[in-house]
Image (spheres, helix red, strand yellow):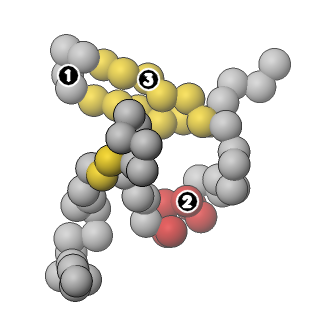
Amino acid sequence: MAGRRKVGDENVRSLTRTSGGKSYAITLPVAVIRQFKWEKRQKLELTIDSSRRRITISDWPKK
């Protein structure tokens, strides 16, 4: 069983494979979810920057 991370390592996350094996997931700290006021099942948009190797998560654009 894995233990908790040390204080100061709260932004270090592991990439895990979901049960189907075709998708991956990263858990986010509850503090981040609360800071952005995201809710369960809220639509979010991913922006992928291949040259800088970054993924940005933002709110779904409202129309």
Give the vertical position of 34 relative to 25 (above or below).
below
Residue placed farthest to the top in the image?
A: 51
Q: Position of residue 37 (x, y in %)?
A: 66, 56
Please give the label number shown on residue 47. Answer: 3
Q: Are marks 1 and 3 in contact (CB under 8 Å)?
A: no
Residue 57 in the figure: left or right of residue 34: left
Q: Position of residue 20 (x, y in %)?
A: 43, 43
Q: Amino acid at mark 3?
A: Thr
Q: CA distance from mark 3 to mark 2?
A: 18 Å
Task: Find residue 58 and report its image quarter.
Answer: top right
Q: Amino acid at mark 2?
A: Ile
Can residue 22 be spotted in the picture? yes
Q: Earlier along the polypeptide chain: callout 1 or callout 3?
A: 3
Q: Residue at x 59, y 64 (%)?
A: 34
Residue placed most toward the observer, 61 or 24: 24
Q: Earlier along the polypeptide chain: callout 1 or callout 2?
A: 2
Task: Find residue 33 and report its image quarter.
Answer: bottom right
Sort mark 1 into few (<14), some (14-19) or many (20+) by Cα contacts within 10 Å.
Answer: few
Please give the label number shown on residue 52. Answer: 1
Residue topped by disc 2: 33
Q: Earlier along the polypeptide chain: callout 3 or callout 2?
A: 2
Q: Secondary structure at mark 3?
A: strand
Can residue 24 be spotted in the picture? no
Q: Position of residue 49 (x, y in %)?
A: 30, 19
